[in-house]
Every structure is written in C-alpha cells, then in structure tokens.
Amino acid sequence: MAAYAALVSLMNTIAMEQTPRNHRGRLISIEKGGLIEALQERADFLVKFLESGRKGAEHLDERIVDAAYAAEDAIDSYMMDRILTSDNFQEENGLAILYEDLRKAAQEMDCIKNEVKKIKEKSSEHGSSSNATNRQKGEAEDLHRTMFTASSSAPRDETSKMVGFEDERARVMVMLTSFDLKPSRAVVPIVGMGGAGKTTLARNIFDDQIIVEHFDVHAWVTVSQEYNVEEVLKGVLSNLTNQGDGESLGEKVHKSLFGRRYLIVLDDIWSIDIWNRIQQFFPDCCDGSRILVTSRLSNVAEELSTCRVEMKYLDADNSWNLLRKKVFGESSCPVELLDVGKKIARNCRGLPLAIVVVGGLLAKGDQTIEHWAHVAEQSTSAAYIDDGEHCSKILSLSYNHLPVHLKPCFLYMGAFPEDYEIRVSKLINVWIAEGFLKPRKGFMLEEIAELCLLDLIERNLIILREWGSTGNLKSCAIHDVLRELSLREAQKENFLCVITANRSDNIPADMKLHRRIALRVNKKEYPRNINSLLSTSRPRSLIVNNYKVLWRILRSDAFESLRSALFERLLKSGMNVDWSRILKTHLFGFLRAIFVIDEEFMEYLSKHKSPSDILFSLVNLRYLDCIADRRFNETLASSMHRMRNLQVLIVKSFPEKIIAPSEIWNLSQLHHVYINKISPPEPLHDEQKLHGFIVLENLWTLKGLKDFKFDEVVVKKIRDLKKMIVAYSAHNVESTSQYSLHNLGRLQKLESLECSFKGAMKSVNTLYKTVSFPHSLTKLSLYRCGFWEDVSAIGSLPKLEVLKLKNCYFHGAEWNPVEGEFISLDTLYMEQVNLKNWNADSSHFPRLEVLNLSRLTELNEIPLDIGEIATLRFLGVQYCSKSAIVSARNILEEQESLGNDALVVKITGFGI
C-alpha cells in the first residue's frame, strides 16, 4: 500500500511540475535522456501491477517506496533551489544534479520493473491462484468501474436498525422515562467491549421520537480517554439553545439545564474522574432528568450506578440476521451461500462491529461460493483467538481485501484523534494535497475523493455522522477499534507515524522512513521531543493538534543532522546565497501539507505572533491552514509567486483583514481558498491574451470572501467554480454597481452559493437587485436581503434543491408563491424572517421534503395545505409565534387522520 501511495504521489508531482504555469511555460523543462518520460512509464507500469492485486511482489514494496521517494525528492529539491535562490540559481549545475538523481531512480525502477515482469510470467505459467485474485485482476483492467461502484447515496438510517438488542433497548428506554419510579436525576450506564454496539444503541435511543418528546433538552458529548473538562462542557453547551450568562462554562451549563428535563449522553467514558469533575453542573430538580453513559469498563459503570445495561454478544441467529442485512438489505440470501454465510457469522463470535465490517466486505465482493468460502477460511483462523486479538484479526480481513486505491484513504484516518468528528470537506482537501489519489479522466479530484470516502462508508470502515442539506457527505468519524487497526497498519507500512508522548525515547527508530507525522502533545506542555523527532525525518506532511505546537515547530532549530548533507549539495550547485536563510527553509522545505486539527486558535493568537515568514518559504506546500499575524499581508504578497503547487489556502485572520495578492490568479493548482480578500488580476497584456491566460480549472471552492468583485477576467478564471461563500457591505446606493454581481450568473458550474449583506436596507436592496443567479445552483443561502417585489429570480432556478433564508425581508411581510416555481426544491429553511402571511399550497413546492422554520415570531400560520405535499417528511418549528405552532399541530393531526404516519413534526419553543 505504501508503494502504491508513493508511486501515485510521484506521478502527481511530475504532472504538476509539467503543467504550464504562465506564458513562460513549464518550470521544469527536462528532456535529457527522456528521464521524466521514463519515470512516468515505469511508475504507471508498477501502479497497474499493484492495482491488479497479484501476489508475490511484497518484498519489492520497500524498494519501490525508496525509488519513488528519491525521484520526488530530486524534483522538489531542484524546485526549492530554483525558486528560493532566484537570480543566484545556477541552472546548468542544478539540472546536472537533478539529472543524476533522476537517472539513479529510473535505473532502480527499471530493475524493479524487470523483477515484476518475471513475477507476472511465473504467475501466468501457474495460472491464477484463486478466484479472488482473478476478481482483483479484472478490477484493475477496468478500475474506472471498480472505483466508482459506490452507490449514489450511503445508508442514511443505520443507527435506527438494531438487531439482537431489543431487550437492552427496552431496558434503557424504561430507565430513561420512568419518572414515577425515580424522579431524581439518574445515571444510566451502558457497558461493553469495543465494537459491542454501545454507541449505536445509545444513538438509536437518543434519536427515538418518544425520547425526543419526553425530554426538554438533549445533548450528546463524546468524552474519550484523553478527556478535557472544558471541552466536555463546551460540547454540552453547543447542543443547547439557551446557554445562560454565567461567568464559567460550568455555570452556563447549570443555568441552561436548571428547571428543564434533560437527557445528556456522555459517550465513551474511560474514567470515573471526569464524572466526579462535572456532575455538579448537572442540576437535580427531581424532574426525571437523565445522564446516559457508555463505557468499556465495568468498574466505571459500577461507580456510576447500581443499575447498568450490559451489551451481550449476539447469538448465532442474530449474528446471521445482522450479517445478512448488511450484505443483502431486505432481500434474501441465495441458498448456495446460506451455510458458508452462517459460518462467517459464527466466526465473528457475536461482536456487532466485526459482523458489520465483514458484511461490508462481502457486500462489495463477488456473491460467489468461492469468494465467500475464501472469507470463511480466513475468518476461521481468527475464530479461536482470545477476545483481545479476535476482533482485530477479523477487522484486518476487510482491510486486507480493500482495493489498493482505498488503503491510503483508510490509513490516513489514524491521523485524527480518537472519537474526532471529521469535516468531510477538510478531509477531502487533505487527501488531495497528500497526492495519493489517482486522477481519473472526466472526474475532478474532489469527486474521486468523495467517492472513495463513500466506498469506505459502505464497507462500514468509516462512520457517516452527518449528511449535508444537498445530500453530500458533511462529517464522518472512525470507530475506536478501527482507528487502532488503521494506526497499526499505517505504522507497519511506514505510511503514518503518530507521536503521542512528550519524551524522545518514544520516537520510532525508523522515523526517517515516515513522510507523514501526526504529533499529539498536551497543549499546556512544551513538546520536548520536537527537535529529536524532526531531526530524524524529512516529513512531507505535518499534522498537529493545536496551533501552539505548530508555532513551536516552525520556530525550532531542528534538522541539525541534515545541515552537512544540505551544505554539500548546495556547494555542488555553485550557489552563492544567504546560507542561514536557505538552511532554515530547507529544514521544512519538503513539507507539502500543514494541517492543524484544533481550530480554537484565537485566544492563543492574541498573545503570540505566528511565523508567517517561515510558512511562506515552504515552496512545496500544497495544503496550508494557518493564522494571520501583523506581517501576514506583506509576507503573503512577497511570497505568493513561490507557492506554485498550492492547492488549499485557508487563512483565518484576527483581527487583521487579509488580502491575497493578484499573483494568486496564476496558481493553476488551486482547489480551495478561504480568505478575506483577493486583489483583482493584473490587466492582460496582448501576449497573455493569446498564450498565457490561466484558467483555474481545479478551483472548487472560494470561501470567506468580502466585497468580491466579479469583473470579466475573474469570471473567466473561475468558470469551473462549484461552491462559494461571499459577503458584501452596501454603504450607499452608488457603490452597489462596483461588484458586478450581474456576472455571477455566468458561473454555470456553480452549485452552492452563500451570500450575505450588511448596510442600510435601501442600499442592500439595490445591491441584491444586481445579482444574477446561475441556473446551475442546487443550494442557495441568503442572509439579510429583501424581496421587495417577488422571489421569481430564485423560484425559477430549475435545479435549486435547498433554500436558506435568514434575516430576510418580504415586502409587506407577505409571500405569494407562483405555481411552476421551486420545481426541484426539497429543503426550505427560514430563520428570523419578517413573514406574516404565507399564501402557499401543495402545488407551490411539489417536491418539498424538509420545512424548517425558526424564530418566525410574526407568522400568522403555516399554510394547512403544506401538509398535503406528498413528499413532505419533516416539519420543524423552533421559537415561532403561538399561532404558527398551533397550525403545525393542526397539520400533524390532519395528516395522522388521513393515515400519513411518515410526517414528523418537531416543535421547540418557550413553554412548549
């Protein structure tokens, strides 16, 4: 797997460096001996071999990795020297070094290729060893098909499907709702080993409509082994609408919960200590409030409560029933697979996680007796191992059977902390920057990444946490037990090294082999092992858990051992440069991704200065998520031209306004940009108009922009943009035309647009009227704008599925939809809208599925005919007028009387 990732990364690096950057052409123009072509040909040959799934070449993995890394290092080193030394760069000497390094890498790959050919010939002589190998070989011949076999949508309702735990579920339900038996606050523990289904059961109950209606307040917090009291309390508060005005987090929690019947879920507790430190903030008003706790440890459950629910192993029938559902859904199992299928289920020994993961493996494989027998044989070897190893062995089956292109994606999940909820958009951006996603014709890399993620979800290796409003994947996670598998395999294959201690004696001896380092240290302690850690490696990716650690790393004096080697190489090139500067930048010069997991950096930033001067000397960076200091604009302006391979730029500012220079429009590799302002492109010269106009074909998202101007050149450059978030300040009516919002309609690939306005309402209204919406939009979010005539400009959008209106104004506080508009709308969300009269019926929103109304305090009623929309499945009303609440109840009663049990109505409000 590491070999595959290294080869694809090399191929992507070559492709990026051979891409014309401007009218002057490529930065690398190497034709001597056809070295680039030779490397590409050999790498492509080896990738196809690995994709074929043929066995017998495992002993070559380390040699493949070394050769690919050597070639990639040679290219990146040449580019660093060329860019950082500028006018002092000796082209002839630099190319001579590059030629020699690439020649050696190509020769080694040639030797490997010849050995692989011999293995293939030998394999052909003896025939295929198994049907599984034949299947994998077929997949390699049409990888486009196999890679995108994931269905258009993953299962959305997995948590509601419980098999074999009906008794446990019923017990917990009674313990939570038995107000008469126990009115005082009570703790209800669910205990069981990892993978036993504790969290699934708790989530199933937490989302149950009976529980939702029984409690006034609900909050879910994941605690984990390395808990933080402050983070736990923040997690509780984030679930509450009324957070109080207390000085401390604990006081806010207490005030928010006092006098309200609440259910708090504390998922994955490992120590009684956390409960002892926070229980005082959960008031006991003798109103039947409950705390539901999940834990692997029996002693913790015993200290929490005398009554607990233990997750038992599934019996043979329930094990088979769960496996069958995971593989075939509601369909029956073919008769010829029954016996072997039941054997596989028994080998999982009643552990739900093992069953669902093996089910994902079987669902994705051939439904043949040969393939199932192969899985049964492998699972049998693990069936008689003790509990501690059994689950790991069973789960490893699924990993071992993964297509090779999915293995790097799965192993990368180990970089995230335990129980961490991962935003899919960020995960996709990091995967792309890492370079292990193989491009496919007709697909953008974002689409490839999302399909890989969806495939892993369908294999039950990754948990889907939340769907976006347009049906996209929004957040995901990985089960603790599977994360342990990911970490173990990643470490074994030198794919990822996770350092969790602050002591240098915990640094692996083979650090120099690791290209990805995830550093986990206590935020309040100085990471003492940073120098020792980084001096033994040359990382391409640095994943840290907070900005303080990143700051320490970038200011550290690491990589002492590399200085002599670097000096010798630079001396050979004949450079006469500022040695101290070059040495310092080369310490981290190979970094292509800096990823900070902890986003709570503002407090730290207010006290410290971030090292932007170093960040923007890292010319190989592809992914940069950083904070701004006072020198940031100056540094960014002087350095942007160096960031030739930058794909993701995320800049948070506090409090300065960050302006990206016009050079950003020449960065052809950009995929995602999050920044305040971008200077307009320089006027085009005649030569540029003919030969050098760069279209940002890879640019997928633009976010965080303020007062962005859509002039003619910009619109041409971002013509392929898919998502955008932009805000405008309308200070006066005369200034509204400067933004050229009429050109917005020319972005015919834009799918998601979030647009907000501030200023005098007259100016805002004038500015909004200049907007032209592209017909490609599927999601539109508008904040503080006025619909003074009608909303036909929105209603006529043919593909619009999601519409969100917040702090918006209707003329006369009335909305009269027109039939034939909003033909594709399935989600409508309105918050703090001045609407009083809404005159709509079922024909106005023919496909509406979700209607969510929040703080519509003037709304007279929700139209009764809305309930007659055949597709409507959810109506949410939060803190709206009493008359709106009454009409929501009337809609529910009428639909229930008509036999419509599919409609869910959720009402939240004061005194409700």
Image (cartoon, grey):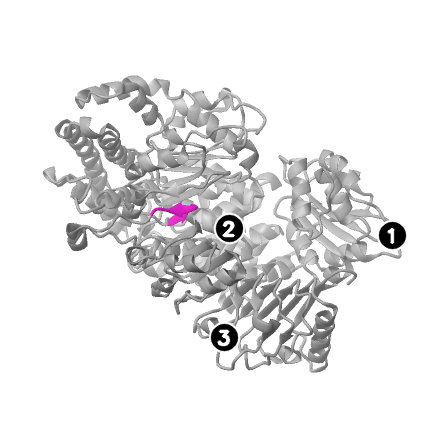
81 and 792: which is toward the camera: 792
What residue sits 64% from the left and 75% below the top? 837
Q: Residue 62: where, in percent of width, then height?
A: 32, 34
- The residue at which mark 3 appears reads as 822
622 and 89: which is toward the camera: 89
Please report whichever mark, 1 or 3, sits nearer to the chain's N-terminal start: 1
Quadrant in the rendering for residue 590: top left
- The residue at which mark 2 appears reads as 461
Label 1: which secondary element: loop
Residue 242 within the magenta-colored segment of the rendering: no
What residue sits 20% from the left and 40% below the top? 27
The correct choice, above or below, for 644 with respect to 214 in the image is above
- The residue at which mark 1 appears reads as 182
Label 1 crowd bin: few (<14), some (14–19), many (20+), radius 10 Å: some
Distance between the Cα atoms at labels 3 and 2?
38 Å
Kind of residue at disc 3: Phe
Q: Residue 632: where, in percent of width, then height?
A: 41, 34
Residue 407: in sight, yes or no? no
Label 3 crowd bin: few (<14), some (14–19), many (20+), radius 10 Å: many
Name the front one of labels 1 and 3.
3
Distance between the Cα atoms at labels 1 and 3?
50 Å
Label 3: which secondary element: loop
